[in-house]
Image: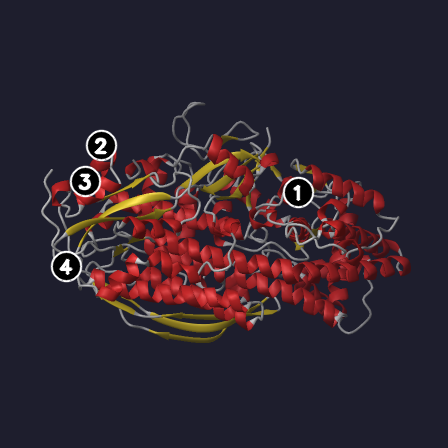
Amino acid sequence: MDPKIKFASVYLMLLVFVFFAGCSGKETGQNTPGYTADVLKTEAVTFSGMLGQGVYLPVNYSLEALDVELKAPSYDLPLEKDKITNYAAFSGKIPLNESALEMLERNGFVVIKNPYDSSEEDITSMYVTLKEEEIPVFITTDSLLHLYHIQFDETLRQIEEKEFYDTLWETDLALLNSSIEEYNSASGEEKEAARRNTAYFTVALSLLQPKPEQIQASDETYGFVDETLFPAGSAGKYQFEVPSFVKEDVDAELALIEAHEGFALSPIFLYEEDYSQYVPRGHYTRSEKLQNYFKAFVWHGRISMLLKDSLIQSEDPAKDSRIQTIQASLISSQLENSPELLENWDRIYGVTAFYVGFSDDLGPYEYMEAMDQVFGNGEREFNETAVEELKAALAENQGPQIYGGTGNCILEPPFTPEQADECLENTTGFRFMGQRFIPDSYMFSNLVGAYTGEYTGDYTKDEAPFTLVISGAGRPIRGFPRGLDTMALLGSERAVYWLDELNDSSYENYSARYGELDSEFSNFSTADWNRNLYWSWLYSLQPLLKNYGEGYPTFMQTDAWQDKELSTSLASWTELRHDTILYAKQSYTVLEGSAMVPPEEKSVVGYVEPVPDFYARLLALTKMTNQGLDEMDVLDPVSKARFTELENILSRLQAISEKELENEELTEEDYEFIKNFGDQLEGVIADVDEKARKTTIVADVHTDGNTGDVLEEGVGYVDMVVVAYKLPDDRILIGVGPVFSYYEFKQPMSDRLTDEKWREMLEANPPEKPEWTSTYIS
């Protein structure tokens, strides 16, 4: 495995059993082995437990083997509407215009605006309406992915609000007090390091601390509690004094965070920081406590105490880099000498690592190890010689793999990949609770700017590829990645096609960089792909991105269906980025300087989107989430019950979809399950409020330093898919189900979108949908 992937060098599989079911038949070109032209055969895998960066993750992953004969009945395309048994009855309730009907006949399916509510934001409500209207239900993968997103996001939000906020407050307050004590007793550079640490933790506590307007007034509690506010009395619970000797620096830092306009020089750390990242986004806009937690955690996740001096803008950068190394060492020592504080740090880091993964940067454990190496059991005196030895020891660790904007690095000619690597290396340092390495940001980092070179095609200002920007040096470069890059590297040949078709791959070195990444990711094992919930979510999308060959239903064998599944996967990935926006390390592009129908004799029945390998992977992910969070004692009974109900539904859908692919008649109970699917979902969304159910979410995933714009990924209103499927009795029926709508667009970094702003944009002036959706949306 390529050592560039940091996880590969830090995690240890404690227990692994892999049972090979074997593979046969001709592969379809999917990176993941086991897909065949006439048999779907996959391996059973079970493993548990992994260790990294000082914490143990309770990963319990169990994927069942599949052995399914692919012999779903087919029909000819274009499909004549007269051959659809229930077309007359269906069109009387949901009429299709000429364009939609033509697309249905050409592809066997079409996506249309939701005729019940074109601005619907709850993907589950359509199933209830379809039952009431007696229209056949088509159960979509979109709805199952959205249901998992709800569980993922809600459990994380509850843990943050109910536990992590207080834990972080207690930890920061204790470390502030320790830093003040060190400042009062130390001298020289160590005294200055303690002063800056005092400022560092004062900023964090100031961001966490509730403001008067964020607190529920005691005289407003007559039977009404505004759950978006801090409880009455919070002012007394969360209070501390700002030390006078850091107040000026702290106020200056807080002013920049409050303005959140973009890059500016940090008054405390003396390098440029992107303050636009401090705008609460994702589910963190749902309460005042979450907004404050977001800002403080971004501070802990982004601010680095650098090993090198290249990005520091001061009179003596070498001295300031020494001071920053001493800062990190003092904080690590404070944690090491206080088991209770280290336990707090481990608790927050361990649970969030289970969700998103390990940090892309050095943290307390690496600094503890380096100090042991340099000082042994002796007294820790941070003189110039000792600090240089510490730096040398720390430099032996794997450095960051994603450029996260630290220092606003600017490349000068000749703009080589080696320069970009050096820029990344210069960001190496300590982050108290560093943002996490995620594979898609790693992909993006390697597919932009100096790594991919100049654009090789012709373009005009009005007609240029989505990815193209003019750098600060006047060069046409790949300033933006696309979601398509990630989907292509997950195995989507259709994504590769669209990248080429849209000229988003037409850059000097794109093919070479893409090839390196493809080789890297295609060699990952199942264990690699399921190291935490973030990676496992991506792994669950892979079956949707393959080519569906002979033996699958006719509509699934079309290019249009691959485009639809591409959008489904991108929308689900958007939800993943939305849910983890606080912890995931965002990538940056480095700035460059310079008729009649036969009577219906049998009942009209519904259908399940037949992708059993998808349901199997999502089921394994759901079980891993349920068991892991339960083992970490962060799962309340209601959330556990929701996960268990989702497990039951996924298991049933897997079994039904296997029958459909094997052309086996479903039982009456199966058809009732499909018909009543909306009722089945009640247990999965029990006690989840309306805001958490909405599909209309947005996440910024990449920042281009050249244009000052960010790449936004959005999910819009719920659309309707109309699908023609053939049953074992040779009848062709059409049914409908809810599907995602997906958007990708650019936005100024000073105006990163919240979900609320995105919903306003959707209502007033939505962006255009991606080009490939024109093949299936009417």
Image quadrant for the C terminus? top left
Asked if 472 appears above or below 72 in the picture, the reply is: above
Q: Residue 98, labelled with which disc?
A: 2
Q: Amino acid at mark 3?
A: Glu
- Report helix, strand or loop for mark 3: helix
Q: CA distance from mark 4 to mark 1?
A: 63 Å
> Which residue position holds label 3?
105
Q: Amino acid at mark 4?
A: Pro
Q: Amino acid at mark 2?
A: Glu
Q: CA distance from mark 4 to mark 3?
A: 21 Å
- Report helix, strand or loop for mark 1: helix
Where residue 650 sits: x, y (%)?
36, 63
Q: Residue 728, labelled with which disc?
A: 4
Q: CA distance from mark 4 to mark 2?
A: 29 Å
Q: Residue at x 72, y 39 (%)?
A: 256
Where residue 479 sits: x, y (%)?
50, 36
Q: Residue 407, labelled with which disc?
A: 1
Mark 3 / mark 1, whichever is N-terminal: 3
Q: Nearer the viewer, residue 372 or 148?
A: 148
Category of crowding for the residue at label 3, using alpha-carbon neighbours closer than 10 angstroms: few (below 14), some (14–19), many (at least 20): some
Category of crowding for the residue at label 1, using alpha-carbon neighbours closer than 10 angstroms: few (below 14), some (14–19), many (at least 20): many
